[in-house]
Amino acid sequence: MGRRNKNKLFEAVEVVDAGAKGKSIAKSPDGRVIFVNNAVPGDVVDIQTTKKRKSYFEGTAINFHSYSDKRVEPVCQHFGTCGGCKWQFMDYKYQLEYKQQEVTNNLQRLGKIELPEITPILGSKEIYFYRNKMEFSFSDSRWLTLDEIKSGKDFDDKNALGFHIPGMWDKILDIKKCHLQEDPSNAIRNFVKIFATQNDIPFFNTRAQSGLLRTLMIRTASTGEIMVLIQFYEENKAVRELLLNAVAEEFPEITSLQYVINNKGNDTIYDQEVICYKGQDHIFEEMEGLKFKINAKSFYQTNSAQAYELYKVTRDFADLKGDELVYDLYTGTGTIAQFVAKQAKKVIGVEAVPEAISDAIENAERNGIDNTQFFAGDMKKVFTEKFINKHGHPDVIITDPPRDGMHKDVVAQIIGILPKKIVYVSCNSATQARDLALLDEHYKVTKVQPVDMFPQTFHVENVVCLERK
């Protein structure tokens, strides 16, 4: 006997709120939460559940009785399949409201700490074409959309250059136009796909580990410079040069054309040799006269304009007078460290990635900044009592950790030295709230400023100022 289908159908349910990871929230008749993946708060829908847990369901809206006034028409033809811009069907002002709500809820409910009035979220001036870096994958067996499947047609063109279908490592959706990166990004991607297809250059097959073309990365900068990197599975000099020459001739504005030969099992390039084919092996980003060299492996905030706003908030919260020793933990390529250096006596940056620290040192030299020092290593192993005794007791700590937040040993070390002020920049207010709770005995939160770096998505940055009690 087969297992009984436990999935339920809930009819004419109102979607009442936005939840985590881009899902919306409804309530079942028995009061359990239903996480809905394709609805907007205010919609009235029939929900087919796909997963049941003790305290909640997950489901999909399969019929709409009425539509929310918070809805807008998505601009992207790939919306709903791509999965990259989950909130594109929600008016931007409501996106900001729900992001603000998420930060507030996380800090209050998870942190359980006393908070000042949270400043209204800083929205992005540009809500489309704001990213400076995009990565696309090649596939010789593209994902067919639901409409294509229903058509019953046979499709000869199986090549794709686009994005992974959410949750499927080997399925690529072919992208015609993406609204995340400004031109010539779309033109470059479409040209590469058409040229490669016309010249029978084989696209990659992830399962078989065969084919030639693996990935395409495009980086653009506010300076107007453009980097293009094509990743090949194996060396084929004639074909490689045919494609690279065609790209260079079609887009003379490209200032950095590079490639990688990568025949390992995954697409990451961080352990691979990047070869410059034409132009320079880097581009420059600029902010308040500071120039930051960006190579193919560099980390840089992917929304340049909003990164500037985020850094200004960070600098304002630090409120440096010129005589402070500042530690910038998780400094990356040292952008924040250099951004605040003019207002500080000295800034010390610590970061786990050695290449990022090399970039930070080089950028500081280029910018004529002589009051910064940068150190590479695991944060919990570098940021120790011995390190502090050698380099000085910080007056201010700026910390911008990854999504997991700060390691408990790093938090313990901060508590051990008790700097006067901490400015905590976070891309995950839930882990930020956890860390703030650990610091609460010694610090008072005096300012909170959410910043939207990624319109059309559920992601939100948050900056918190803590002052010693």
Image (tube, rainbow, N blue to C red):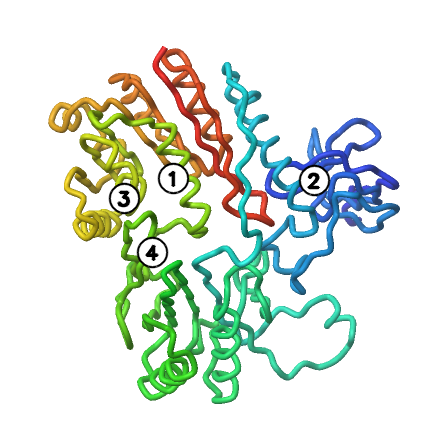
Is 372 on the left-hand or right-hand side of 18? left
Q: Which tag, 4 or 3, sits closer to the chain's start?
A: 4
Q: Callout 2, which amino acid?
A: Ser
Q: Choose the circle earlier in sequence order: 1 or 4.
A: 4
Q: Amino acid at mark 1?
A: Tyr
Give, as a three-letter code, the residue at label 4: Glu
Circle 1: is it few (<14), some (14-19), or many (20+) Cα within 10 Å?
some
> In the rendered view, would you say 317 is above or below 308?
above
For the residue pair 235 and 315, the one nearer the viewer reads as 315
Label 2 with label 3: CB-CB less than 8 Å: no
Mark 4 vs mark 3: in front: 4
Question: Looking at the image, do the residues carrying marks 2 and 4 touch, with CB atoms under 8 Å apart?
Answer: no
> If the image is split into quadrants, where does the C terminus sit?
top left
Query: Residue 201 falls in which quadrant of the image?
Result: bottom left
Residue occupied by mark 4: 285
* Residue receiving disc 3: 334
SS for dot 2 = strand
Q: Which residue is under mark 1? A: 311
The residue sitting at 42% across, 24% down in the picture is 435
Report, in whole angstroms, how far the alpha carbon at label 2 lies from the one at label 3: 37 Å
- Measured in 3D between alpha carbons, the distance from the residue under mark 1 to the one under mark 4, in whole angstroms, is 14 Å
Instruction: Find the distance from the CA under tag 2 to the CA under tag 4.
Output: 37 Å
| Contact (Cβ within 8 Å) of mark 4 with mark 3 | no
Identity of the residue drawn at 29% across and 36% down: 340
| Labels 1 and 3: the sequence-earlier one | 1
Look at mark 2 in the image and give the residue it sits on: 24
Q: CA distance from mark 1 to mark 3?
A: 12 Å
